[in-house]
Image (cartoon, rainbow, N blue to C red):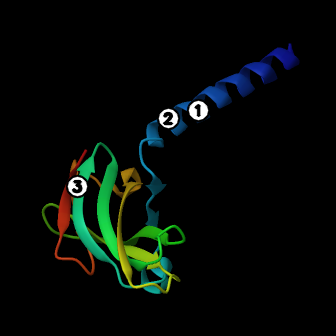
Amino acid sequence: MKYTLVLSFLALSLLACSKNKDINSTCDLASISSIAQYNNAPSDLVSIDSIWIEDNCLHLIFGASGCSGDSWEVKLIDSEAILESYPPQRNLRLSLKNDELCLAYFTKELSFDISNLQVDGDRVYLNLSDSNQGVLYEY
């Protein structure tokens, strides 16, 4: 009896985990909420060309100089602050660590799961620092 209950629990746990994985599998990376990383993460020069939201994924097209862009380390970091306005606002930063020392210019498109940035209500405006762009996230 105990053996059957343990197996049932494990099976349900695995199903729950695989279901969560499927929800987030459409985004390339997860966003991070951390004031420490927001203030201290690498900030190599990056240019943001486009920003839009599909489902719970924030899509960015960005560019920087480099040899190929294959070694770039990119993070989308939230400051953890919620600005009191209507709609509420959050400040985000695209962190780029770029050790490539070439003069070529490359662009990439990445998407970030932003479901962890939801606040009370049904929308939040996302400000992207070092960019004149922002986007309204409705959920």
Quadrant of residue 118 in the image? bottom left
Quadrant of residue 95 in the image? bottom left
Callout 1 crowding tier (Cα within 10 Å): few <14, some 14–19, many ≥20: few
Q: CA distance from mark 3 to mark 2?
A: 21 Å
Indicate left or right for 107 with 21 as reference. Answer: left
3 or 2: tag closer to the N-terminus: 2
- Report the residue at 15% width, 60% height from top: 87
Q: Residue 54: percent from the left, percent from the top?
A: 27, 45
- Report the residue at 34% width, 79% height from top: 46
Q: Residue 34: percent from the left, percent from the top?
A: 47, 72
| Tag 2 near tag 1, CB within 8 Å | yes
Describe the element under mark 2 as helix, strand or loop. Answer: helix
> Can residue 89 be spotted in the picture?
no
Residue pointed to by mark 2? 22
Pick whichever, 95 or 72, lies toward us.
72
- Report the residue at 31% width, 68% height from top: 62
Pick whichever, 2 or 61, lies toward us.
61
3 or 1: tag closer to the N-terminus: 1
Work out whether 108 lies above or below 36: above
Q: CA distance from mark 3 to mark 1?
A: 27 Å
- Look at the image and tell me in which quarter the N terminus lies: top right
> Can residue 78 be spotted in the picture?
yes
Type of residue at label 1?
A: Ser
Callout in the foreground (3, 1): 3
Type of residue at label 3?
A: Trp
Indicate left or right for 122 with 27 as reference. Answer: left
Residue pointed to by mark 1? 18
Describe the element under mark 3 as helix, strand or loop. Answer: strand
Label annotation for residue 52: 3
Describe the element under mark 1 as helix, strand or loop. Answer: helix
Work out whether 64 lies above or below 12: below
